[in-house]
Amino acid sequence: MKLLNKLPQSNPNLHVELIDNGWIPMKEPKNLRSAILLSIPLMMIASMISIGVINIFSSISLNDFGFSEGAIIITINFSIILWLVLLMIIHELLHLMFIPNFMKSKKTFVGLTLFGAFVITEEEILKSRYIFITVAPFIILSIILPLILSVVGLLTTTLKFLVILNAMGSSVDLLNLLLIMKQVPNNATLTCNGPNTYWKKDQTEQIG
């Protein structure tokens, strides 16, 4: 695992090597801005799913977040900023911890930029495992966690806000999930070259 202070770039030589070895580039948004724009509908869907989960055992309303008739009251304090930073770190750690042998990997990169934290791995990972890595933060933080906290009575307004925010922030992950499900066949393997993703079908399946 390597620590970086900026997103790794695509390596043209590695791209040629991957193509020569039968890897197929996925059709993906060209940059993060495009990915965010395309994921806006998923942002809304993910937040609604999270709100629905919260409503199973708890309650949630716009008044909880400073919205009332004829007025919007927004209070930002230092503790909220700390919570947001912690949420971002935990979100990325959940991606990281499910990457096989991430501690020993020389092809896994983590970092923190002005635009947020990131985790990228160039390890070869089976599609099923890759999908789990992609959606783990959304499933754990925005579905499982609020259920547990609601049952034990610890789901505060601040935590509800963070749970929903994580769901919204998972929209790009969910976009990646849809792209993988649509383009990559079952039993395939995925890898990355910087921000670009490639896949290759299982060789034994091709021979058969």
Image: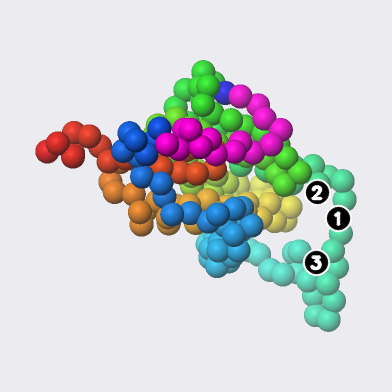
Q: Amino acid at mark 2?
A: Ile
Q: Amino acid at mark 1?
A: Ile
The numbered mark at residue 65 is none
x%, y% of residue 131? 42, 44
Q: Amino acid at mark 3?
A: Gly
x%, y% of residue 182? 36, 57
The reply to whether callout 1 and callout 2 are in contact (CB within 8 Å) is yes
* Residue 3 drawn in magenta: yes
Q: Residue at x 54, y 43 (%)?
A: 195
Whether residue 150 is visible to the viewer of this picture, yes or no, is no
Q: Residue furthest bottom?
A: 70
Q: Which residue is mark 2?
A: 80
- Give the camera-side residue of 89 and 201: 201
Q: Residues within 10 Å of mark 3 (few under 14, many from 20)?
A: few
Q: Which residue is mark 3?
A: 66
Mark 2 or 3, nearer chain start: 3
Quarter the N terminus occupies: top right
In magenta, the rendered stretch is: 2-16
Question: Mark 2: which secondary structure?
Answer: helix
Quarter the C terminus occupies: top left
Mark 1 or 3, nearer chain start: 3
- Give the camera-side residue of 46 and 199: 199
The numbered mark at residue 76 is 1
Dot in front, 2 or 3: 2
Q: Residue at x 76, y 69 (%)?
A: 63
* Residue 68 drawn in magenta: no
Q: Residue furthest left?
A: 208
